């Protein structure tokens, strides 16, 4: 199939889907943005449109949307804060769902063994959750202060820093499976590994419980401050990017391998290997997703030639070319 035929078919599918999604979501509560540029919702600031970006009002409207999309074969993509995502220039077909505007509050309940159970909606921002816990004098989340995602995204990625991952403090999760049924999974049912997790079923995290210890509020605040300062000096956190692009291969640092391959500051279009930290790619302003994807390939090839090591992306690439 020629590329133009492919694009025409994709476009037609998109128009057809859009019309039916609009009708189908008519009676579902929440905000619907049609043909929404995903570049507005990813930290790379690139990516084409979502046919619809849906912000469910509450759990009931999310359940309804998932059931409707199931019955009508509308694909679903869950968006957290878009901080680990490269959305391609052709966008994402079907329904992109964000839980950021869903009703819900953070709660703290007593746990066993003098611990505290922090119950939080999955759409909560991680830095906000960390600050909430620190403010209550609860210890265990501080190292995640620099992870600019949502709790849901952190769970999917088993986000971590300073040798601690969210899996270390995970207690349980409530999840909506793709049939629209709510399930609960405890720690012993989930496998956490380096930047990834395996749950018994695929689905949308609704709410998670994290188990924290009592700590000293002032000491925790100080720790958070130091961690943020450290990050600011070593990573390009104020620029458009998605954190570490590649996972560290066993016994190596991806950033060091990229630097040794002579790629620091190397660029394609406006996509550049950060001069500050070689495992970060930054969008200098007008980068396209295809520039970033191309740069990722070049890095993989050059590191393979130089070091014989295959770099695996940590970021997720989604959508249509
Ligand atoms: C400056 C910067 C620094 C970073 N530093 C770190 C770091 O130190 N450590 C680290 O681990 N990561 C880091 N990251 C990467 C990123 O912030 C994390 O991977 C984060 O956990 C992604 O969360 P998100 O909400 O942005 O998810 P997204 O990028 O939106 O999505 C990531 C995946 O999670 C899925 N997802 C999101 N929400 C849900 C949900 N409710 N239910 C089911 N699936 C869901 C998405 O479908 C997708 O598959 C950094 C990123 C940046 C930009």
Image: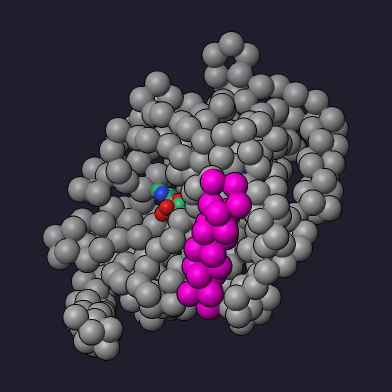
In magenta stretch: residue 101: no
In the rendered view, tell whether residue 169 sits above or below residue 147: above
In the rendered view, tell whether residue 67 sits above or below residue 220: below
Name the residue at the top extreme.
Answer: 113
Q: Give the residue displayed 68% in from the left and 69% down from the top.
A: 266
The x and y percentages for residue 38 are 47, 73
Q: Give the residue displayed 54% in from the left and 64% down from the top.
A: 298
**Residue 30 seen in the current view:** no
Q: Main secondary structure of the magenta part?
A: helix
In the rendered view, tell whether residue 24 sits above or below residue 3: above
Q: Nearer the viewer, residue 7 or 154?
A: 7
In magenta stretch: residue 296: yes
The x and y percentages for residue 219 are 84, 30
- Going by the image, does 123 lie left or right of 265? left
Q: Give the residue displayed 81% in from the left and 36% down from the top.
A: 223
Q: How many marks?
A: 0
- Going by the image, does 241 lie left or right of 100? right
Q: Which residues are magenta?
A: 288-308
- The picture quadrant where one finds residue 302 is bottom right
The x and y percentages for residue 164 are 63, 31
The x and y percentages for residue 285 are 66, 79
Q: Quadrant of the C terminus?
A: bottom left
Q: Quadrant of the N terminus?
A: bottom left
Name the residue at the front extreme.
Answer: 305
**Residue 217 seen in the current view:** yes
């Amino acid at each position: 199939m020629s590329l133009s035929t492919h694009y025409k078919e994709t476009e037609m599918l998109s128009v057809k889907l859009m019309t039916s999604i609009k009708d189908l979501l008519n009676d579902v509560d929440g905000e619907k943005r049609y043909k929404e540029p995903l570049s507005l919702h990813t930290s790379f600031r690139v990516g084409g449109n979502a046919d619809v970006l849906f912000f469910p009002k509450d759990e009931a409207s999310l359940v309804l949307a998932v059931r409707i999309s199931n019955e009508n074969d509308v694909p679903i993509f869950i968006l957290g804060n878009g901080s680990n995502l490269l959305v391609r220039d052709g966008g994402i077909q079907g329904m992109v769902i964000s839980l950021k505007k869903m009703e819900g509050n953070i709660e703290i309940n007593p746990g066993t063994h003098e611990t505290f159970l922090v119950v939080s909606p999955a759409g909560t921002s991680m830095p906000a959750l960390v600050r909430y816990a620190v403010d209550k004098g609860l210890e265990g989340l501080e190292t995640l202060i620099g992870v600019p995602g949502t709790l849901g995204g952190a769970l999917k990625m088993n986000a971590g820093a300073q040798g601690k991952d969210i899996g270390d403090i995970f207690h349980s999760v409530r999840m909506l499976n793709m049939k629209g049924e709510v399930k609960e999974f405890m720690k012993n049912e989930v496998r956490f590994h380096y930047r990834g997790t395996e749950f018994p079923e695929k689905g949308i995290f609704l709410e998670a419980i994290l188990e924290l210890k009592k700590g000293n509020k002032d000491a925790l605040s100080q720790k958070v401050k130091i961690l943020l300062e450290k990050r600011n000096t070593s990573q390009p956190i104020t620029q458009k990017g998605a954190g570490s692009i590649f996972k560290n291969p066993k016994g190596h640092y991806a950033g060091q391998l990229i630097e040794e391959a002579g790629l620091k500051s190397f660029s394609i279009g406006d996509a550049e290997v950060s001069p500050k930290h070689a495992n970060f790619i930054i969008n200098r302003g007008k980068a396209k997703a295809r520039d970033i994807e191309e740069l990722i390939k070049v890095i993989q090839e050059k590191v393979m030639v130089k070091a014989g090591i295959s770099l695996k992306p940590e970021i997720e690439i989604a959508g249509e070319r």
